[in-house]
Amino acid sequence: MTANTQTPLRHHIKDASLAEAGRLRVEWASKEMPVLRQIRENFSKEKPLKGLRIGACLHVTTETANLITTLRDGGADVALCASNPLSTQDDVAAHLVHNEGISVFAIKGEDNETYYSHILSVLDHAPHITMDDGADLVSVLHTKRRELLSNIIGGTEETTTGVIRLRSMEKDNTLEYPIIAVNDANTKHLFDNRYGTGQSTLDGILRATNTLICGKYFVIAGYGWCGKGLAMRAKGHGAKVIITEIDPLKALEAVMDGFEVMTMKEAAKIGDIFCTVTGNINVIRKEHFLLMKNGAIVSNSGHFNVEICIPALEEIAVSKRTTRSFVEEYTLPNERTINLLAEGRLINLASAEGHPALVMDMSFANQAMAAEYLVSYSKEFKKKVYKVPEKIDQKIALLKLRTLGVKIDSLTAEQKEYLASWQMGT
Ligand code: ADE
C-alpha cells in the first residue's frame, strides 16, 4: 500500500503500480461519456470552480475518475474517498493519484475503520463543496467535524438513500447547508437507477456465481427504479421474476408489468436468486433464511449492507466457508446452504464495475453542472435539499440525444398556442 502523509499530495491507495492499467480503463470509459466531455471542455475554458475545494465521497470507478478530472479542469482542487468499502477500483485510485495528481483515499476491501478514516482525510481538505453518494460524508461532517461547516457553500448527493437521509436532516432542522439532489434529476434516476442498476446488478451476480439465470425464480425486493430495471433485465434473461413490495402502488405496477408479486415469506420458499434494492433495513431476515431452498443465492444492490440481516444468518448458520470470490456459503441447521454474495454489499460494484459509462455520463453531467449551479447562485440557497433545475435536466437530455445521433421534433407555433390555451376543445 502507498500511504503518504508527508508531501502536499496526500493519499492512501492500494498499489501505485496499477496506475497505467487504470489510465487505460479510464480512457475507455471516457469514450462513452461525451456529455461530460463537452462539460469538461467548457470547464477548461471558463474555470467555474476556480479556487474551490471539493470533497468527494463517491464510488472510485473509471466513470468517477472522468468526473473528478472534469471538476479539476474546472478549477477545483478535489479530494476523493470511497462511498463504499468494497466498490473501489484500485487501478483507478492509483491512476488518479499518480497520473492526475488527485488526493485519493480508497482501497477495495478496506475495513469500516479505514473507510471512516478516509472520509476524515477528505474532510481535512476543508472542502467548500461536498459531493456525496449515500450521505456518509455529510453525516461525518455534521457530527464529527462541525468546525468545517462554515467553509461550505453547498453539496450534491448522488443516490436515493443519500437523498432520503438528507431530507430527514432537513426535516429535523439539522442540515447546515444546501444540497442538490442529483439523484432526483430525470436524466439521473430514469437511466442510471433503471438501466444502470438493471444491467450492472445482473453483471455482478453473474461474475460472482456464473449461475444460469434462465428458468430460475429471481426474487427482487423493491420495485423502485432500480427494482424495475433489474426485473426487466432478469426477465430478458429468461428468469421467472417475483417482486416483493410494501408500497401498494408499486406492487400494482409490478403486477401490471407482468410480474408475480408476493410477500417475502412466500417468495423465500420459491426463489433461487434473491436481490434486495429497497434502501431499507432487514428486508431478508431469519424467518426467510430458514424457508429458503438449498443453494439459494442472496444478494443486495441497494446502497448499504443492511437490507439482508447478516447477523441473523451468522447466528443460525452452523458453518460458513468462502467458495468463490464474493461468495460465502452458509450451512443452516436444516443442512441447506445459502450463498451470500459480497457480504451483502452492493453486488454491482463489489464484483462487477458498477453502471456502464454511457449512463454514468448523464449522472455525472448532473453532478458537474449542479456544482457549477451551486457556485453561481450560492447566495440564493437555504439549508435545504434542492432539485436539479429542470433547465439543466433538459439540457443534459438534449446533449445526450445529440451524442447518440438522435434528432427530435420541436413544437410548431400552432402547437405552442394550443398548449397554452384552455378555450380550445374538440
Ligand atoms: N454507482 C453505480 N455505478 C457507478 C459507477 N460506475 N461509477 C460511480 N458510481 C456508480
Image (spheres, rainbow, N blue to C red):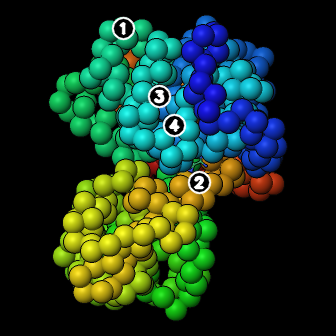
Contact (CB < 8 A) between labels 1 and 2? no
Is residue 264 among the parts visible in the rendering? no
Among the two numbered marks 3 and 2 on one chain, the one whose residue lies closer to the N terminus? 3
Contact (CB < 8 A) between labels 4 and 3? yes
- Residue 82, numbered circle: 4
Among the two numbered marks 1 and 4 on one chain, the one whose residue lies closer to the N terminus? 4
Among the two numbered marks 1 and 2 on one chain, the one whose residue lies closer to the N terminus? 1
For badge 1, the amino acid type reads: Ser
Q: In the figure, is residue 382 to the left or right of 56?
A: left
Among the two numbered marks 4 and 3 on one chain, the one whose residue lies closer to the N terminus? 4
Q: Which residue is mark 1?
A: 150
Query: Is 240 situated above or below 103?
Result: below
- Residue 354, numbered circle: 2
| Disc 4/disc 3 C-alpha distance (Å) | 8 Å
| Disc 3/disc 2 C-alpha distance (Å) | 21 Å
| Disc 4/disc 2 C-alpha distance (Å) | 13 Å
| Disc 1/disc 2 C-alpha distance (Å) | 34 Å
